[in-house]
Amino acid sequence: MIHVRDVCKSYPTRSGTKVVVRDVNFDVYPGEKLGVLGRNGAGKSTIIRLLSGVENPTRGVVDRQMSVSWPLAFGGAFQTALTGLDNLRFICRVYGVEPETKIPFVDEFSELGRYLREPVGTYSSGMLARLAFAISMTIEFDCFLIDEIIAVGDQRFHDKCHVELFERRADRAMIFVSHDIGYIQAHCQRAAVLHDSSFTMFDTVAEAYEFYLAQ
Amino acid sequence: MTVGQSSTSLWRSWQLQRRVIFALLMREVLTRFGRHNIGFLWMFAEPMIFTLGITALWTISGATHGSDLPITVFALTGYSSVLLWRNMPARAISSIQPNLALMYHRNVKLLDIFIARLLLEGAGASMSFFILSLIFIYIGWVDPPEDILKVIAAWLLLAWFGMALAIFLGALSEQYELVEKFWHPTAYLLFPLSGAGFLLEILPEDARNALLYLPMLNCVEYLRDGYFGSRFTAYYSVPYVILCNSALSLLSLAKLREVSRTVIPK
C-alpha cells in the first residue's frame, strides 16, 4: 500500500510561490494499475516524484508500505560520461543487487551490443530508452512508477516492454503517466486526472477520460 | 526480492548507507580517473607529484624556513597536510548540481554524494603521504616517525576538519555562487599561515597564540610532533581542534539539511 494524505507541493518562483498540487488524497493497492491523466504542466511528473520519494511534499504525508521504484522515465537518471554497463553497475549497487548477474539480461533486452561499453552520451534516444528500461527491470519493486513509457521506441521495443511489465510483473502495482488514453485504457483499472492543481480520482478510466476531456 | 522498504531500522539504514556510498565511490573513481593509462592510480599519483615538486623546490632553494631540520621531512609533512585540508573543499564546492541525476534514486542523499567524493579525496592524499613516507624512509632521507600513533591521530583530525569544512562550503556554494569565487584565493592565502612552511617555535609568543586559532596549524604541529618531535618544540591543542571540528561538523550538517530541502533532482 501507498497512502497519500493531504499532500501539497509548491515551488518558489521569481513571481511568488507556485502551487503545483494541493490536497491530494489517494491509496495505491498492491497489484493495481493506475493511470494519471493531465495536460502538459499539470503536475503529473510531480506526483510521480512525490510517490517515489525523490522529492518531499511541502505538506502532508506519503507513506510507502511497499517498495517503490524510482521514476522510470526514459533517459533520466543516467551519467552520460559513463558507459551503459557502468550505469547498470551503479544502479545495481545502490539497490544492493549483484551487477554481474544482471548483465546478460540487460545485454539481451537492450540489444545494444558493443555500445553497452560506450559512454551513454553517445546513444540515440531509442538506444537510451532500451537501456533505461532494461536497467529498470533488473531491480524488483512492488510498485513501478512509469512516466511516459511509450513516448519513444519502435513496435518491437513496445512488445518487449509489454512482456516484461504486464506478463512477468502482472502482480505488481504500476502507476502510469501518459497522454495516450488508449494505453491507459488498455492497462489501468483506475485513473486520476490532474487539473488546476487538484487531483481527482475516478473508479474507472472511462469516467476519468470524460472528466479530462471536459476540462 | 524487493528493495527499498520505507520502514528502516538503524542497522538497515547503516547497511543502506554503506551500499550507497560504495556505489557512489566506484562511480566517482570512474568519472574522475576513467580507464585510461594508469586509471585510478592517479588518485594518489597526482598528490604525490605535487608533494615531490614542492620538496624538490624547497630543497634546491635551500628554504629551511628558520630551522636546521632536513628539508625533506619538513616538506613531506607540511605539503601533504595542505593537500588534505585544501583539496576536500575544492572538490565539494559546486558539486551538487552535476550530481542531481543521481538523486533520482531515493536512497542517494546529498550527504552520501559528499562523503563518497571526500573519502576518495582523503584516500588519495593519505595514500600519497603514506607511500612517499615509505619511499623516503627506505632511501634514508627521512627517519621513521618517532610516535606513529600521534601521526595517525593528527592526520585523522586534519581529515575530519577538511571533511567538515568541505561539506559546509559545498552546501553553502549551492546557495551562494560567491563561495566558489572566494574559496580559491582564501585557500591560497591560508596556505602560508597553515604551518606548511614554518614551525611555530620560530615565532614570537603573541603571533604564535594568534595563529593557533587555525585548526589546521594545530594539526600540522601535532603531526610533526609525532614525526620528529624531539627536534623542535611543538605547539598545539588537541582539545581545541576537536572542539572546532565538532562545531564545524554540526554547522555543516545543519547547512546541508537546509540545502537538501531546496534541491530538486533533475
Image: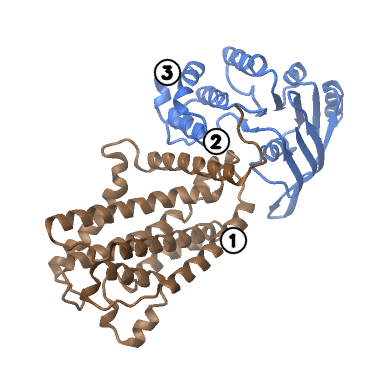
Chain colours: A blue, B brown
A133 or A197, which lies in front? A133
Residue at left offset 35%, top offset 59%: B84
Q: Is residue B47 left or right of residue B178?
A: left
Distance from Cα at disc 3 to Cα at disc 2: 21 Å
Q: Which residue is mark 3?
A: A113
User: Residue B254: which numbered mark, if any?
Assistant: 1
User: Residue B140: which numbered mark, if any?
Assistant: none
Residues packed near mark 1 inside 10 Å, few (<14), some (14 to 19) or many (20 plus): some
Figure label count: 3
Q: In this rendering, is residue A5 above or below A14?
A: above
The earlier-in-sequence mark between 3 and 2 is 2
Q: Is residue B67 left or right of residue B191?
A: left
**Mark 1: secondary structure:** helix
Q: In this rendering, is residue B237 above or below A173?
A: below
Give x and y (percent) for residue A103. Answer: 46, 22
Q: Which residue is mark 2?
A: A77
Residue at left offset 84%, top offset 34%: A200
**Callouts 1 and 2 on one subunit:** no
Evaluate whether residue B46 shows in this view: yes
Residues packed near mark 2 inside 10 Å, few (<14), some (14 to 19) or many (20 plus): many
- Chain letter of the residue carrying label 2: A
Distance from Cα at disc 1 to Cα at disc 2: 27 Å
Q: Is residue A144 left or right of residue B28?
A: right
Evaluate whether residue A177 shows in this view: no
Distance from Cα at disc 1 to Cα at disc 3: 47 Å
Q: In this rendering, is residue A145 above or below B177?
A: above
- Chain letter of the residue carrying label 1: B
